[in-house]
Image (tube, rainbow, N blue to C red):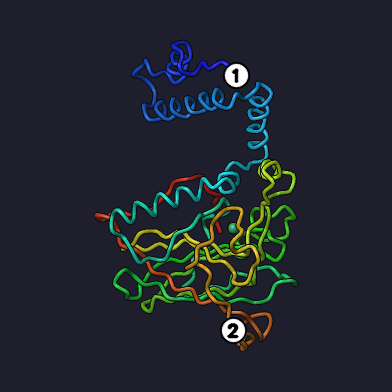
Amino acid sequence: MSAKVFESKEVQNLLQAAANLGSQDGNQRAKQITHRLLSDLFKAIDDLDMTPDEIWAGVNYFNKLGQDGEAALLAAGLGLEKYLDIRMDAQDREADIHGGTPRTIEGPLYVAGAPIREGVSKIDLNADEDAAPLIIRGTVTGSDGKPVEGAVVECWHANSKGFYSHFDPTGAQDEFNLRGAVKTRADGKYEFRTLMPVGYGCPPHGATQTLLNTLARHGNRPAHVHFFVTSDKSRKLTTQINIEGDPLIWDDFAYATREELVPHVVEKTGGAALGLKADAYKEIRFDIKLTPLVRGKDNQLVNRPRAAVTA
Ligand code: FE
């Protein structure tokens, strides 16, 4: 049996001192959160009888995580980002907000600043031999079901190697390759002319994959396309679609798949006339329904560090 010290006066005083609860100075919310998280950690150390070796392995892991720049990736892989979605879904139900296109996680690979086009954007700037042409199109509607004019639909996705522009370790892609922004006209329609993405995995030697290996988990995602949709009169939507047929759709290491977000992939011809690299192409229709502001405010705007480039 291990000694239990968590409840002792000495440890409770230590926690209060570490979070500086005795002082009126500092950020009260930060102090509250620090005190709680540290208390939960201390209690877990007691309950699980964690050894010093385990604690220092954990401390060192945070150093490695920071060196690799993977904290946001790990947040997705451990379900933290999904958990935020589950909470927002529950808040929407409580607020009686229904019927919009479901949200799903943003992930860490958005880049702000893609040039905004009217109605249609061709976003495959770099040749990619292994990727076939793809059109993603749909209509943005409001909660009244009517098309939304002036909505901005942004999308971003990986290439055939599973790499995103701006974050591509091979340096093969220009800024904003496979990233685009389209502003809808009165008909609410948007269209991206692009190339089919593939799924991708965590960097194999990074801190995230190291932990996943320890848990006997893979670090792969099915092929997908990310979206932000914004409009003056609606709440911002952060979502993704999966590419139908990908074997990992229900085995996504980041838990982003939702049943309503796997639209059909349809075979089409006539791509040459649309400026695609082949006449045969695939088309995905993804209609987007936005939800209304809450008391005039968008409660879906999430502040987090994001890459930004001036196009
Ligand atoms: Fe992604």
Mark 1, residues whose alpha carbon is within 10 Å: few (<14), some, or many (≥20)? few
Mark 2, residues whose alpha carbon is within 10 Å: few (<14), some, or many (≥20)? few
Foreground: 102 or 178? 102
From the top left corner, tell me how far across and down residue 43 is, in percent: 50, 25
Q: Is residue 301 left or right of residue 96?
A: right
Helix, strand or loop at mark 2: helix
Write the residue at 48% across / 28% down. 40
Quick check: which quadrant has ligand 1?
A: bottom right
From the top left corner, tell me how far across and down residue 222 is, in percent: 63, 62
> How far, Cα to Cα, is label 2 from label 1?
72 Å
Which residue is at the far top? Answer: 10
Write the residue at 73% across / 60% down. 172
Residue under label 1, please give it.
1
Residue under label 2, please give it.
274
Asked if residue 232 is positioned above or below residue 34 in the image, the reply reads: below
Residue 187's label in the rendered image is none
Write the residue at 45% across / 27% down. 34
Foreground: 266 or 24? 266
Q: Which quadrant of the rendered structure holds the N terminus?
A: top right
At label 1, the amino acid type is: Met
Write the residue at 56% across / 62% down. 156
From the top left corner, tell me how far across and down residue 195 is, in percent: 64, 72
- Foreground disc of the pair 2, 1: 1
At label 2, the amino acid type is: Leu
